[in-house]
Image: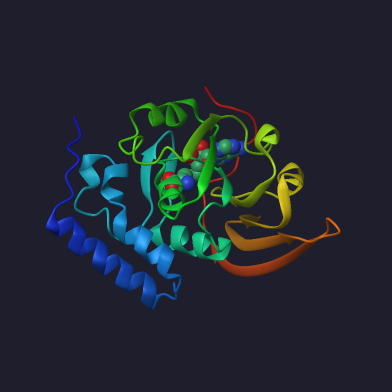
């Protein structure tokens, strides 16, 4: 059984991580506060307890990973999250990114295509603390038409292209942040939906994600 203990040592390491993220250019205080408040080691196997606050991705089973803290902070900052935002996340994975968004006051709708990872939400340690996270098993390329439109959409896997159905599920004035494939690495793209339903596209840095795959698994 995993022990959920947030010690002074963990808190100290988390402080160091936040300092590092600032040095790397993260300026949104709400993002930094959320990272400071959420014990990342709770989202990992206890074998990673001592290294959970290194700025690295780690395996979470099913060949998937928890994103690097810098990547989580970078995508969240680009989304300009405000309290009450309705956010669609593609790729629940470890639930860490979902929790950061929920801690910032967003209503989070998160989709995972790997059944085993999706089902892990039943034992989610913070399920009472964050009733503002809703979990869905499905294919992120389809989005969640029944709950659309969304203020923000975040894709946490490498998309081969910007999924057109997700653009449709975005509110006018809403933003989607998505790493788009350029071979071995992905370019972080932010699109903003304009009043005439066209999109403004901005390009940011290169990252490396696990692939966004079609269909469900399991
Ligand atoms: N946000 C996660 C990152 C997990 S890695 C975290 O904080 O831990 C990316 C996740 O996207 C993996 O769990 C993978 O199974 C999932 N994924 C890939 N393609 C998908 C799709 N089409 N729909 C939903 N989830 C997908």
* Residue nearest the viewer, comparing 33 with 75: 33
Q: Position of residue 160 (x, y in %)?
A: 68, 49
The spot of residue 156 in percent (x, y) is: 54, 49
Residue 82 place in picture, x, y as percent:
53, 59
- Residue at the (19%, 56%) spot, across then down: 10
Q: Residue at x 73, y 65 (%)?
A: 201
Relative vertical location of residue 77 with respect to residue 27 in this rendering, above or below: above
Q: Position of residue 182 (x, y in %)?
A: 65, 59
Locate residue 215 relative to residue 94 in the image: left or right.
Answer: right
In the rendered image, which quarter is residue 136 located in? Answer: top right
184 relative position to 168: left or right: left
Answer whether residue 162 is visible to the viewer in this image.
no
Q: Nearer the viewer, residue 152 or 53?
A: 152
**In the displayed structure image, the side of residue 42 where residue 171 appears, left or right:** right
Which quarter shows the N terminus? Answer: top left
Could you tell whether 1 is left or right of 175 in the image?
A: left
Of all residues, the one furthest to the right in this rendering is 196
Check the image and name the residue furthest to the left: 8
Q: Is residue 132 above or below residue 85?
A: above
Foreground pick, 181 / 139 = 139
């Amino acid at each position: 059984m995993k022990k959920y203990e947030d010690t002074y040592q963990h808190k100290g390491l988390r402080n160091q991580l936040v300092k590092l993220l600032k040095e790397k250019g993260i300026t949104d205080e709400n993002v930094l506060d959320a990272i400071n408040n959420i014990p990342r080691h709770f989202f990992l196997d206890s074998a990673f307890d001592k290294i959970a606050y290194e700025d690295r991705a780690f395996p979470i089973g099913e060949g998937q990973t928890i994103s690097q803290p810098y990547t989580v902070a970078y995508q969240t900052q680009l989304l300009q999250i405000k309290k009450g935002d309705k956010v669609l996340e593609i790729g629940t994975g470890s639930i860490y990114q979902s929790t950061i968004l929920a801690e910032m006051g967003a209503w989070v709708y998160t989709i995972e295509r790997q059944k085993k990872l999706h089902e892990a939400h039943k034992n989610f340690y913070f399920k009472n603390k964050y009733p503002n996270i809703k979990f869905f098993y499905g294919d992120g390329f389809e989005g969640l038409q029944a709950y659309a439109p969304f203020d923000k959409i975040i894709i946490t896997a490498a998309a081969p292209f910007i999924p057109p159905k997700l653009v449709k599920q975005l509110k006018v004035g809403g933003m989607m942040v998505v790493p788009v494939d350029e071979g071995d690495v992905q370019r972080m793209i932010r699109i903003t939906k304009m009043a005439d339903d066209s999109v403004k596209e901005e390009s940011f840095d290169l990252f490396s994600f696990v692939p966004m795959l079609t269909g469900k698994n399991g």
